[in-house]
Image (spheres, helix red, strand yellow):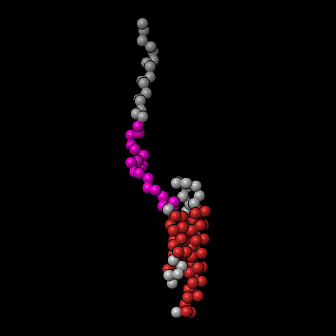
Amino acid sequence: MTTPARPFPAEPARRSPLPAHPPLGAGVVPRPSHGGRLPDVAIMFGALSIVTFWMFGFGILLGAAALATGALAARRPDVVDHGSTSPEALLGMLAGAFGIAAGLIFLGSALPNL
């Protein structure tokens, strides 16, 4: 037998199934998005503003907080957890607006009698 004129190419180096360096952020647990909580907070503030409309301005402040939180929640929808949260944010803003209106009507009728 004669040796071939050209030797066979060397076997290619085998790669390990795991990368040499872990990808960026490996080992870091993803933090939950706070966008899923904002509509719930808006609904809570709105409900509390309706319940406390008779507390001489406290219901109005909670209603304003519900409007602000609902607007912030509608601006940042949470698509990681579930679909659109804008109906819940709208419900919180409507409850806050109703609490503000009820508080203003109460203040308008109660202040002259004090």
**Residue 65 visible, this angle:** no
Question: In the image, residue 6 lies at what x, y percent?
Answer: 45, 18
Above or below, 36 against 109 in this view is above
Question: In the image, residue 50 lies at what x, y percent?
Answer: 55, 74
| Closer-to-camera residue (106/93) | 106
Q: Is residue 55 located in the magenta-colored stretch of the structure?
A: no
Q: Left or right? Give the position of 8 relative to 79.
A: left
Q: Is residue 29 located in the magenta-colored stretch of the structure?
A: yes
Question: In the image, residue 37 lies at what x, y percent?
Answer: 50, 62
For the point 41% across and 37% down, the residue is 18
* Image quarter in which the N terminus is found: top left
Above or below, 55 against 112 in this view is above
Question: In the image, residue 17 lies at what x, y percent?
Answer: 42, 34
- Where residue 64 sits, quadrant-wise, is bottom right
* Region in magenta: 18-36
| Closer-to-camera residue (110/85) | 110
- Where residue 90 sits, quadrant-wise, is bottom right
For the point 52% across and 54% down, the residue is 81
The residue most toward the front is 113
For the point 39% across and 43% down, the residue is 21
The residue most toward the top is 1
**Residue 62 visible, this angle:** yes
| Closer-to-camera residue (12/55) | 55
For the point 41% across and 32% down, the residue is 15
* Main secondary-structure element of the magenta-colored stretch: loop
Q: How many marks?
A: 0
